[in-house]
Image: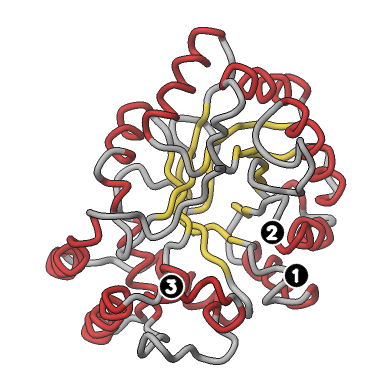
Amino acid sequence: MKYRRLGASGLEVSQLGLGTNAFGKRADQETSIRIVHYAMDNGINFIDTANIYAGTESERIIGLALEGRRHNAVLATKAGLVKDQGPNGRGSSRFHLQRELEDSLRRLRTDYVDLYQIHTFDPNTPLEETLRTLDDFVSSGKVRYVGASNYAAWEIMKALGISELRGYCRYVSTQTSYSLADRTPENELVPFCLDQGVGIIPYFPLAGGILTGKYGSENKAPDGSRAQTDPGFARFLEDRNVALGAQVGKLASAFDATPSALSLAWLMGRPAVSTVIVGATRVEQMDDNLRSVELALDAGTLEELDTISEPFRYGKPFATYRLS
C-alpha cells in the first residue's frame, strides 16, 4: 500500500480508502467485518462512514470490526445530513453536532475519531458556530482532524478564513463526487484545494459502479447491483454515463486491467487527491480495487482517459448532497 498526507496535515492515509455505505444494507454484518479486516490486512488504514449510513448500522458494524485493531485505523465519520425529522435533526449546529458525535463514538466503540466531517454545508447555521464546535471537539480529544463534504469551493474558503481569524482548527480535507464520469471539481474545487492545502477525498469514484462496465444498457441492472437495490440510483443511468463505462472497459482490455482498477488509478493520479474511498459488498471486490494502487498508467492511456472524459468536466455534478 502507498500512503499520502491528508491535505497539508501530518496525517498519513492509504491511497485507497474503504467506503462503508453498503455495510448493514447491501452487505450483512459478517461480510462487512470480513471486508474491514481484509482491507486492513492489505494496508488500507482509511475507513470512512457516516452517522446516517444504513440507518446507523454502518457505524455499529465498524465498531465491532475494529475491536482490537482500532489503533491501526484512520477512522472518519460525518454528521450534518438529515438524521431525523425533529427540529434539530440535521445541520451543523452545536446542538446537533454534539449529540451526533457522542452517538457515533458509542456506536463505533471508541473515544475518538480521526477525521470528523461536516456532511454538507448548512445555510441555516453560522459557520462560526460550526467551526467553534469542531475546534472544541479537537481540544477535548474526541476528534483529531476536521473536514468538509459537499461544500462548494467558496464555502470552504469562507470557513478557512474564519478559522484563521479566530484561531480555530481548519478543514484539512473535503469529500466530493469525483470520477471519470464527474470531473466538475476540476473547474474550481481542485485549484482551490491545491492553493489552500486541502486534501480531496473523492466519493463515487466508480460512478456507483457504472465505471466497472457492469451496466450494459440504461434499462438493465445486474443482480445485486446498486441500481437494483436502490431504486433512486436509476437516475444516474443516463445514456452518456453508460457509454462512458463501455469506453473505459475497452481501454481497460487493451491495457490488460479491469475497468475499476483503471478508473481508480486515473483518479489517484489527479492533483490534490489524498485518498480514494471505494465501497465493497464482497471481499473479492477488494482485490480488484487494490490492484489500482500498483497500476502505472502510461502517457497514452492517460491522454485517452482524459479525452473520453473531457465532456464530464462541464454541466451538473454526478452527485451532490445538500440541505434545502
Tell me which numbered mark, 3 or 1, is placed earlier along the sequence.
1
**Mark 2 residue type:** Tyr
**Circle 1 is placed at which residue position?**
24
Q: Any mark on residue 53, and which?
A: 2
Q: Dot 2: within a 10 Å radius of its alpha carbon, few (fewer than 14), some, or many (20 or more) residues?
A: some
Tell me which numbered mark, 2 or 3, is placed earlier along the sequence.
2
Give the quadrant of residue 143: top right
Q: Dot 3: within a 10 Å radius of its alpha carbon, few (fewer than 14), some, or many (20 or more) residues?
A: some
Q: Residue at x 60, y 38 (%)?
A: 118
**Mark 1 residue type:** Gly
Q: Is residue 140 left or right of residue 224?
A: right
**Mark 3 residue type:** Arg
Camera-side residue of 309 and 316: 316
Give the quadrant of residue 215: bottom left
How far from the left and from the top, in percent, is residue 70?
77, 50
Q: Work out how far the residue at label 3 is from the one at label 1, CA to CA, in angstroms.
A: 26 Å
Circles 3 and 1: CB distance less than 8 Å?
A: no
Q: Secondary structure at mark 1?
A: loop
Q: Is residue 182 above or below residue 129?
A: below
Q: Residue at x 56, y 43 (%)?
A: 323
Q: Work out how far the residue at label 2 is from the one at label 1, CA to CA, in angstroms.
A: 8 Å
Q: Residue at x 37, y 85 (%)?
A: 218
Q: Any mark on residue 291, and which?
A: 3
Camera-side residue of 193 and 221: 221
Q: Is residue 255 left or right of residue 23?
A: left
How far from the left and from the top, in percent, is residue 200?
42, 44
Circles 2 and 1: CB distance less than 8 Å?
A: yes
Q: Secondary structure at mark 3?
A: helix
Q: Is residue 133 above or below residue 18?
A: above
Tell me which numbered mark, 2 or 1, is placed earlier along the sequence.
1
How far from the left and from the top, in percent, is residue 59?
76, 56
Q: Residue at x 36, y 81 (%)?
A: 258
